[in-house]
Image (tube, grey):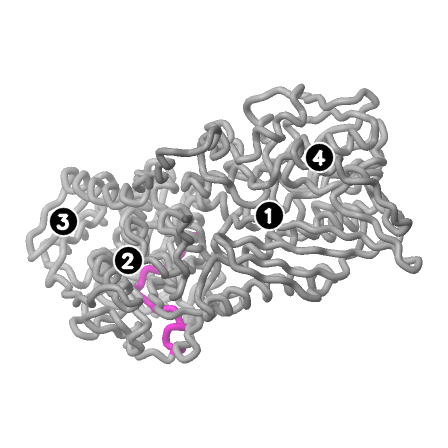
Amino acid sequence: MKTPPLPLTRDLVLVGGGHTHALVLRKWGMNPLPGARLTVITTGPTAPYSGMLPGFVAGHYSRDALDIDLVQLSRFAGARVVLGAAEGIDPERREIHVSGRPPIAFDVASINVGITSDMPRLPGFAEYAIPAKPLGPFASAWSEYLSGDGPASVAIIGGGVAGAELAMAMAHALKKRSRPARISIVDADTALPGLGAPAVARIRRALDRLGVRLLEQRAVTAITHEGVETDQGLVEAQFITGAAGARPYPWLAESGLEVVDGFIKVGPRLQSSDPAIFAAGDCAHLGHDPRPKAGVYAVREAPILHDNLRAALGAGQMRDYRPQRDYLKLISLGRKAALAERFGLTLAGALMWRWKDHIDRKFMDRFRDLPTMAQPPLPRHHADDLQEALGEKPMCGGCGAKVGRGALRTALERLPHSERADVTSLPGDDAALLSTGGVRQVISTDHLRSVTEDPFLMTRIAAVHALGDIWAMGAAPQAATLTVILPRMSAELQERTLSEIISAAHRVMRGAGAEIVGGHSSMGDETTIGFTVTGLLEGEAITLSGARPGDALVLTKPIGSGVLMAAEMAGIAAGADVAVAYDLMTQPQGEAARILSGAHAMTDVTGFGLAGHLNGICEASNCGASLDLDAIPTMPGAEALSASGTRSTIFAENRMLAPDLPQGGKADLLFDPQTSGGLLAAVEAGEADALLADLRKAGLEAARIGVVTAQTGLRLNR
C-alpha cells in the first residue's frame, strides 16, 4: 500500500536572508522537520557576505564571489522563497507584512534582516550618497564608479573598522586603475574605536601609506552634489558612502516587540518578548549578554537558533546561546594584507590575508557545495519499462510537466466532430469559440504543476498562463473559475494557503478585466493550480490559420523558462536568473494582445516550445517559416544551462515536432517548454517595426524573430 505524504501542520517563517538564517537553511536541508512548512522572506535572490566586501571593493574578488544564493539554498532546504521586502510583523495576528502581497501567516518566526548604514535624517544623503549596507546596492554602485575614468574623490562617513576597510580597499582599487584619488574618512569622534592601541596604530599607518585622509572630530551636517558638509567646512567628493555604525530597520521598533535602541531584544534562547518570535544577527540585541555587532556572533548563533526553532515547533529541547568574550578580528588593509587582533595581540601582513581569505572562502563553500540528496531506489520487483517512464530526473513543474503533443493529438483525434451549431471548431487552437445569442465567446482551460513552493507567486504564474489563450485569440478576458489541488495539510494551513491563492488570482484576473466566479479545491500529493477562463470577442477571432507568406514573426517575451525551472528544481540555476524568470512569467500580455490585435495569426508560446507552437501556425496556415536564431531573445542564464545539458521533462517530445531543425547551442531552446510564455504573432511586414516600438514602449522585451514563407516547414537562418 502506497504511503501518503505526511501532512503539513505548522508554518515556520524566516524573515531575512542574513548569515544566521543561511546557516539554518543549510542545516534544515540536511534534516527537515516533518510537518513543518518553511518559508524564507528575502528582499533579493542573493545575500552578500559582508566579510568579503572589502576584498571585492579592492578587486580581489568577483561580484559573484560575495553572494550566497538564497534561491538555491532554499530549494535544498525544501523552503518556499518569497522575494519581497518585509515591512512589519504583527505578533498578535501572527502575520508578516510583505510589500506587494497579502500578509504571510506564521506559527513560529525568526528575524535576521541585518542592519543598514542609511542616514535618513542627514539632509541630502538619500540623493547624493549610498549606504554601505545593504551590501548589494552598494557593491553595484561602487563597480559603476570604479569603471569610470579620471581623478576620483571619495568620502566615507564613519571611522570605525568598516569605514577604514572600505577606504583602504577603495584606495587600492583606484591605484590599480591608475586613477588619481582623494579619499577621506569623516568621523564626528575618534576613529577606530573598540581596537587596542597597537592595532589602531598599524591601521593609521596603513591609511597614511595609501593617502587616505582621516578627518576626526568633524560633525557631518549635510550631503550635497559637491561633497560632505561638516561643521569645519566642505569635504569634496563624487562618491559618498555611509559606514557610521549599525542602524536597525525602522519597522522593528514598530513591531510591538521589546527593543533596545530599535534592535529586537532577545534572551539566551534568542527569543524576543514574544516567545514565538526569534531574532538573530545584527538586528538583535542580546539582552542577557550585550555584544557589539559582528558577523562572528551571527554565525555562532545559527546552530542554537536551528535547534530552538525546531523545539518551538514541537521537536527537541531549547538551548541557551552563550556568546564568546572576545573574538578574532581580521581587518583587510587594501592590498592582499590583513591585520589580526584578539586579546590585545596584533599581527599583520600577507599571511594574515591568506588566513582571512581561507576562512571567508571556507564559509562561502558551505553554501556552494550543498550535499546532493540521493533519489530513493526503485523497488526490487517492478513492472517492465518503469525506469524508462520514470526518466533520469524528477518531473518538472509548469509546462515542463505537460503531456507530449503527439500523445495529446492522438487522443483528441478520436473525438467525434462537434454537432452543435454554436461551437466553432478551430483545429490546433487551445481555446474554443462559442456563439450565444449573437455574442461570441472564447473559452479555455489550463492548469500547472507548481514550479515554486510559493502559492501566491505560483497562482500569478498560472493565471497569466491561462489568460494566454484568451489574449492570443484577440478576446477580452471575462470570467474565470479556479481549480486548486493542495498537498495534505492541517485545516489552518489550508485556510492560509487558499487565502494567498485566491488573493493572487483575484489580482491578476481583475487586472486583466475578468472576475473570479467560482472554483473547486481538493487535496492531493502536490500543489496544482488551474483556471478555466472565458473571453468576449468584438471582432473576428485571431486563430492559427491566418498567417501569410511574407508576414513578420513577432515574439513578446524571451524564451528559456523551461530550462531555468528544471535547473532551479535541481538546485543549479542562479537565483538572480530565477528571479528574472519569475518576473517574466508573471508579466501579463493584455497590452501586447491589444497592440497585436491586427495580427493575421497568433498563439501563446507554452508547453510545446517556440518551434512547436510556430509549427502549429504553419500547419494551420499551410505555410512555413524561417527563424533568425540570433534575434530570438532568451532569459538570463538559459543558454548556458541548455549548453550544459539541462533539459525540461518534455524536451525530447518537443524536439520531435520539428525534427528537421538543427540541434545544439541556442537552437535547443526552440524546443524548451515555456510556462506563461509570450505571444507569437504573424503580422504585416510593413507594420512590424511600429508594432515592435509600441510593444517595447509598453515594457515588453519583444523581438522580430523571422518571416513566414510559402515553402512549408521550419528553417533556421543562422
Looking at the rendering, which quadrant does residue 118 occupy?
Answer: bottom left
The kind of secondary structure element at disc 3 is: strand
Q: Work out whether mark 3 precedes mark 4 in sequence or the reverse, and give the earlier one.
A: 3
Q: Is residue 250 magenta?
A: yes
Q: Which residue is mark 1?
A: 584
| Nearer to us: label 2 or label 4 | 4
Residue extending farthest to the right is 438
In the drawing, does residue 160 fall left or right of residue 613? Answer: left
Q: CA distance from mark 2 to mark 3?
A: 23 Å
| Callout 2 touching callout 4 (CB < 8 Å) | no
Q: Which residue is mark 3?
A: 340
| Callout 1 touching callout 4 (CB < 8 Å) | no
Look at 23% across and 47% down and name the residue there: 332
Q: Which residue is mark 2?
A: 20
Q: Work out whether mark 2 precedes mark 4 in sequence or the reverse, and give the earlier one.
A: 2
Q: CA distance from mark 1 to mark 2?
A: 31 Å
The amino acid at mark 4 is: Arg
Mark 2 neighbour density, 10 Å: few (under 14) some (14–19) many (20 or more): many
- The residue nearer to you, when weighing 374 against 202, is 374
Q: Is residue 705 magenta?
A: no
Q: CA distance from mark 3 to mark 1?
A: 47 Å
- Mark linked to residue 409: 4
The kind of secondary structure element at disc 2 is: helix
Q: Work out whether mark 1 precedes mark 2 in sequence or the reverse, and give the earlier one.
A: 2
On the rendered image, what quadrant is the C terminus found in? top right
